[in-house]
Image: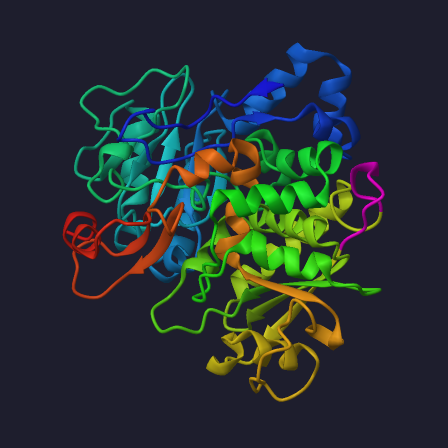
Amino acid sequence: MVANANIECNPGPGKCWVPFSAISDDLLKDLKAETLSQAKARGPRELNAVLASLRRDSVSKPAVFVGAGTCGLGAGAGKTLTAVREFLARNDIDADVVEVGCNGMCSDEPILDIQIPGRTRVSFSTVTADKAPQLLDSVLLQNRIPAELVLGQYRTAGAKPWDAVSYLDEHPFLSPQVRVVLASSGIIDPGNIQEYIAHGGYSSIAKALRSMTPDAVCDLVERSGLRGRGGGGFLTGRKWKFARAAVADQKYLICNADEGDPGAFMDRAVCESDPHRLLEGMLIAAYAIGATKAYIYIRAEYPLAIQRLNGAFEQASACGLLGYNILNSGVDFSIKMKMGAGAFVCGEETALIHSIEGKRGMPRPRPPFPAVQGLFGKPTVINNVETLANLPVILDRGAEWYAAMGTRGSKGTKVFALSGMVKRTGLVEIPMGTSLRNVVFDIGG
């Protein structure tokens, strides 16, 4: 096992991000990823060096990260990216420019992070195109952190911290949060599958395929207490067992990414910022219920999310993580994208099924429930993006770990979109049982 020692907050109450614990040898054994496969063939030292490079435990040259989710682009991140590239070219600086997703601090967009060799990664607020050149000059040429723009520095293992710069996990917006679903959003490159793998991604599905039966996966998810995050709140593992028990020649999994509620953008942010986490969650769910085909039902108004999901499908297929005989396990799984036309009613699962079937999106009476008779009359499990994105971490860290968060009846964390009359808007992930007063006044300010 290869330890993951990248960006992680304190193990105490101030912890924000929950990273994966390790990279599985089972995954690397049959993974068709050229860079990692070649490094593994050259031995553990070379493999660890490549993984550390992908995780950016340290960097050999400066790296500039720009939050290029929908919220960041709406705030001008596209122009910031242009200004960054022009500055680097003008000053003949060799640096990586990485487009990341949304870290949830939407009121501080455009957000720009800088990491230079030997030092921790630092995040800066409201870096519009006119501010970017001066900021880059200060950090890259003068080795100085301008206090007026800084949000905080990450706890990057093995890197020297900057003096007089607070840590990002101490920011009042982040310090009360526990980020499970959003753990990598705004940190990793959503368009690089090997970066996701280097942080421990896809090790959970490898573990399930190699050492767990589908029934064992269902049992583990039920013990975790994970409930559907789409509104109904039904126990996920129990829903899966109904579909698993149904006898049929074909079963389906549907990811509901319709997200029609006004002001909600949690699912969109996950699809844009960490699409491989969602894809891995879908693989786990499909294996558990015995589905070989899946659909993602997503709003056509989410073009960036659609683009990044399609890119994730292509990369996963090339690595042997999607399609025929996944990781030489004998398991097949394919995904199709279905774009909705924005009808609010299609967020309801039976209306969504009708829409995928090419019918008018209208709810139907239940029973029969979709787990018994759903898409095209076959057993179908429908989970939303947030539910599925929890699964890789639950399999990685265990049911008891997840069940230790939250309340007696509602386990784990919940992601909220915080907007309106608050100082700090954005995405908030907090343990179940946290009061709305804490969310609005402490986190939102």
| Quadrant of the image occupied by residue 250 | bottom right
Tell me which residue sits at (39%, 23%) in the image: 156
Give left or right: position of 129 versus 170. right
| Quadrant of the image occupied by residue 426 | bottom left
Residue 353 at x, y percent in the picture: 64, 76
Residue 313 at x, y percent in the picture: 69, 53
Total count of labels = 0
Tell me which residue sits at (37%, 53%) in the image: 415
Residue 314 at x, y percent in the picture: 72, 51
Q: Nearer the viewer, residue 432 or 194?
A: 432
Residue 176 against residue 53 in the figure, above or below: below
Quarter of the N terminus within the rendering? top right
Give left or right: position of 269 versus 360. left
Give left or right: position of 210 versus 224. right
Residue 10 at x, y percent in the picture: 32, 25
Give left or right: position of 318 versus 7. right
Tell me which residue sits at (75%, 54%) in the image: 290
Q: Main secondary structure of the magenta part?
A: loop
Q: Nearer the viewer, residue 352 or 311?
A: 352
User: Is residue 190 in view from this perspective?
Assistant: no
Magenta residue span: 325-333
Tell me which residue sits at (44%, 45%) in the image: 185
Q: Nearer the viewer, residue 296 or 72?
A: 296
Q: Is residue 331 located in the magenta-colored stretch of the structure?
A: yes
Residue 350 against residue 208 in the figure, above or below: below
Q: Is residue 206 located in the magenta-colored stretch of the structure?
A: no
